[in-house]
C-alpha cells in the first residue's frame, strides 16, 4: 500500500492518483511481474466522525474492494485534523488466489475539522469516477441525529446530493427519528438502504424457507397474528422492519413484547393461524430454533454479522429493493 499526501483539491488529488498508478506500473516492470490491473466499479464515499479518525472506515473499504472494487473515499471529521481539509491517496492491492497479477483499487482519505466538513462536497464532486454509481455510506452519527447542527446537516445533504444510493445504520437511533430521516430521502427520490434491515437476513432466510414447501396446508396468508419479542424497552427499528416485512403482504395483526434473552435485539417471532403455530426463537447466544405445531424442529446458527459482511451484502443490491421498501412503509405505519 503506497500513499501520497495533498491539499484536498480535486485537481491535486487526481494528479496524485495518476502519479501513484505510474509508480505502481514502474515497480511491476522493474520486478519483471505482470502489469497491475486497475479495478473500479463504483465510487464509495464514507463520512465518519468516529474517534479513530477514519481508521475503521478505511480498513472496511479495503476489505470491501475484493468483492466490490471501487474508488474509495473516506471523509474523516475530527477535531484533531491538522488543517481544514487535507487528503492522501493510496492504492489497495491484492493478488487473487493462484494469480500473479495484482488487482489494485484507489483510495482517498480526506480529513476535515468538524466546522468545515460541509465544504468537502465540491471536492468530492470532482473525485467521483465518471459514469459509475456513487454510493454514500454515512457513518457520521452526529449528522444523522435529529438535533444535528446546521453545519452537520448541510454537510450531510451536500454529499447526499452526489449519491445514487445512500447507506446508513439506524441501530441505536429512536425508531421514529430514524424512519423519518429515511422517509425524507425517499421522498426526494433517493435510493436508500439501512444496515439494520441487512442484519435481518439471518432471521428472514429461515422464515422464508419455512414456507417454501408448496404442500404445506397452512400457507403464509393464513397466519393472521404475529408477535415479536425484543430486549429493548420499546421496539427497535430492527424489530419494526421484521414486523413490517412479515405483516405487509396480508396486514397480519402485530404485537410487540419486551422479554429477556441472549444479547440485544429480537429474541422470538411467533405466528398464529386458526389451526397452526410457528415459533422462531433464540435459544442460545449462537443458536435460533424453529418449532411448529406439526412437530417440526430445526436449529440455525446465529451470530452478529460484522460491518464488512453487512456492507458486502448491501453493495450487492445496486437498485430498488422491493422487500425493504414494503417493510419500510409498513414499519412506519406500525411506529405510528
Image (cartoon, rainbow, N blue to C red):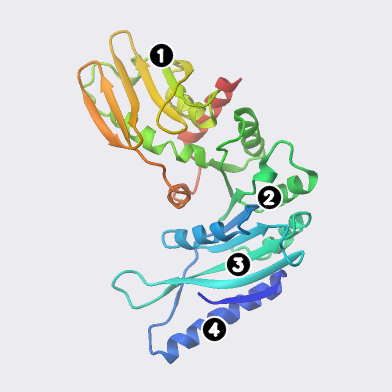
Query: For mark 1, what is the residue?
Result: 225
Query: For mark 2, what is the residue?
Result: 161
How far, Cα to Cα, is label 4 from label 3? Answer: 17 Å
Task: Between label 4 and label 2, give the one nearer the viewer.
Answer: 4
How far, Cα to Cα, is label 2 from label 3? Answer: 20 Å
Contact check, label 2 and label 3, Cβ < 8 Å? no
Tell me the SS state at disc 3. Answer: strand
Q: Which mark is residue 108?
A: 3
Q: Earlier in the sequence, mark 2 or mark 3?
A: 3
Seen in the picture, residue 204 relative to 336 is either above or below; the reply is below
Tell me the SS state at disc 4. Answer: helix
Tell me the SS state at disc 1. Answer: strand
How far, Cα to Cα, is label 1 from label 4? Answer: 63 Å
Question: Is residue 211 among the parts visible in the rendering?
Answer: no
Tell which of 283 and 301 is nearer to you. 283
Q: Which mark is residue 130?
A: none
Q: Earlier in the sequence, mark 2 or mark 1?
A: 2
Contact check, label 1 and label 4, Cβ < 8 Å? no
CA neighbours of label 3 inside 10 A, class few (<14), some (14 to 19), many (20+):
many
Q: Quadrant of residue 289?
A: top left
Seen in the picture, residue 284 relative to 190 is either above or below; the reply is above
Q: Is residue 94 left or right of residue 130?
A: left
Measured from the top left, where is residue 160 in percent x and y? 66, 49
How far, Cα to Cα, is label 3 from label 1? Answer: 50 Å
Task: Between label 2 and label 1, give the one nearer the viewer.
Answer: 1
Total marks in image: 4
CA neighbours of label 1 inside 10 A, class few (<14), some (14 to 19), many (20+):
some
Query: For mark 4, what is the residue?
Result: 22
| Quarter of the image that includes the C terminus | top right
Amino acid at each position: 500500500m503506497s500513499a501520497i499526501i495533498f491539499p484536498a483539491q480535486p485537481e491535486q488529488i487526481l494528479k496524485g492518483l495518476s502519479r501513484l498508478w505510474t509508480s505502481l506500473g514502474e515497480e511491476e516492470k522493474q520486478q519483471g511481474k505482470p502489469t497491475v490491473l486497475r479495478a473500479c466499479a463504483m465510487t464509495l464515499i464514507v463520512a465518519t466522525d468516529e474517534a479513530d479518525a477514519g481508521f475503521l472506515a478505511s480498513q472496511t473499504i479495503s476489505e470491501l474492494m475484493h468483492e466490490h472494487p471501487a474508488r474509495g473515499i473516506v471523509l474523516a471529521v475530527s477535531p484533531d485534523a491538522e488543517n481544514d481539509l487535507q487528503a492522501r491517496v493510496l492504492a489497495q492491492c491484492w493478488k487473487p488466489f493462484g494469480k500473479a497479477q495484482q488487482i489494485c483499487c484507489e483510495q482517498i482519505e480526506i480529513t476535515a475539522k468538524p466546522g468545515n466538513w460541509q465544504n468537502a462536497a465540491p471536492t468530492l464532486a470532482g473525485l467521483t469516477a465518471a459514469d459509475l454509481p456513487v454510493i454514500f455510506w454515512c457513518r457520521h452519527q452526529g449528522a444523522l441525529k435529529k438535533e444535528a447542527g446546521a453545519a452537520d446537516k448541510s454537510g450531510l445533504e451536500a454529499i447526499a446530493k452526489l449519491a445514487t444510493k445512500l447507506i446508513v445504520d439506524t441501530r441505536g437511533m429512536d425508531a421514529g427519528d430514524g424512519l423519518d430521516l429515511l422517509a425524507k430521502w425517499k421522498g426526494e427520490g433517493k435510493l436508500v438502504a439501512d444496515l439494520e434491515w441487512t442484519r435481518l437476513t439471518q432471521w428472514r432466510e429461515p422464515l422464508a424457507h419455512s414456507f417454501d414447501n408448496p404442500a404445506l396446508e397452512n400457507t403464509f396468508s393464513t397466519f393472521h397474528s404475529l408477535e415479536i419479542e425484543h430486549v429493548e424497552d420499546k421496539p427497535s427499528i430492527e424489530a419494526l422492519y421484521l414486523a413490517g416485512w412479515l405483516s405487509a403482504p396480508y396486514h397480519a395483526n402485530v404485537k410487540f413484547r419486551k422479554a429477556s434473552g441472549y444479547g440485544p435485539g429480537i429474541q422470538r417471532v411467533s405466528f398464529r393461524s386458526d389451526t397452526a403455530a410457528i415459533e422462531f426463537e433464540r435459544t442460545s447466544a449462537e443458536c435460533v430454533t424453529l418449532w411448529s405445531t406439526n412437530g417440526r424442529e430445526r436449529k440455525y446458527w446465529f451470530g452478529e454479522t460484522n460491518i464488512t459482511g453487512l456492507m458486502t451484502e448491501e453493495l450487492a443490491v445496486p437498485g430498488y429493493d422491493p422487500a425493504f421498501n414494503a417493510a419500510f412503509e409498513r414499519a412506519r405505519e406500525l411506529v405510528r
